[in-house]
Image (cartoon, grey):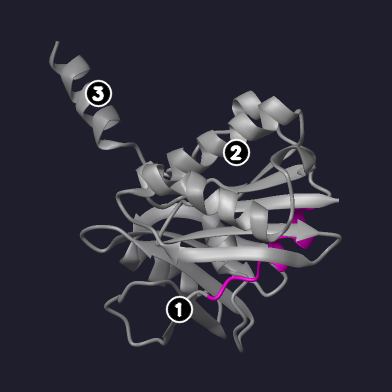
Amino acid sequence: MKYLFLDTSAFNVNIAVVVDDKIVSSFTVANNQKLSEHIFIYLEDVLNKSRTKINEIDKVFIAQGPGSFTGARVGVTIAKTMAWALNIPIIPVSTLEIYATTKVDSKYVVSFIKDRNDYLYAGIYDTELNIFMEDKYLHLSELLDVLKEIDDYIFVGYDDLDISEEIVIPTIDIMKIIKKHNDDQAVNVHLVKPNYLKKTNAEINLEKENKSD
């Protein structure tokens, strides 16, 4: 079996081709505003290095967010198009769960992506990727309240937070995610969409306009 893993949802672009439970080709680069221009070059490079043709892919795993609105949308659109055109399963996974594959010396992983004004996207997972707190958009103070219920945890993310605890930079384990979700039931390709966890600015502005009418 040949799988494609694709994550363009946050700070890094991560692409991998997995053949028979082994990563045969992978690529990681910092995400940037020119993602839509470069993503197909990245994909082609990873496929070529794995000696895999696009029509040989049996399943695609896609990081659906939260994270960058544009990044998540680009990745999900590509994965959906591929799954539809090739008639193969598509498996959406949480970006925060992907962060939680980082190897840490603790019972729980607090995966997070910082937003503005001490708000953040966060999820809490144990080392087997079981969910303690589902992914949420919340204030840092709310997250700290939740963490009073547990001990032995480590924050995993790319940003600094106004906290005293250690923060570990994500080093994701793609095979751990694939093994966890390989038996998941495939989602209807037309129902897969980016998981922003909060409304976009355009949605917020539209609601304001509708209320003022």
Q: Which mark is residue 79?
A: 2
Point out the tag, 3 or 1, that comes first from the N-terminus: 1
Q: Would residue 27 be counted in the magenta stretch?
A: no
Point out the tag, 1 or 2, that comes first from the N-terminus: 2
Looking at the rendered image, the quarter that the C terminus falls into is top left
Q: Which residue is mark 3?
A: 207
Cα separation between marks 1 and 2: 26 Å
Graded by Cα atoms within 10 Å as few (under 14), some (14 to 19) or many (20 or more), the crowding at tag 2 reads: many
Q: Which residues are magenta?
A: 171-182
Element assignment for label 1: loop
Q: Which mark is residue 169?
A: 1
Q: Nearer the viewer, residue 87 or 165?
A: 87
Element assignment for label 2: helix
Graded by Cα atoms within 10 Å as few (under 14), some (14 to 19) or many (20 or more), the crowding at tag 1 reads: few
Residue 1 percent across, percent down from the top left: 86, 51
Say which amino acid is labelled 2.
Ala
Magenta: main secondary structure: helix
Say which amino acid is labelled 3.
Glu
Residue 123 percent across, percent down from the top left: 52, 61
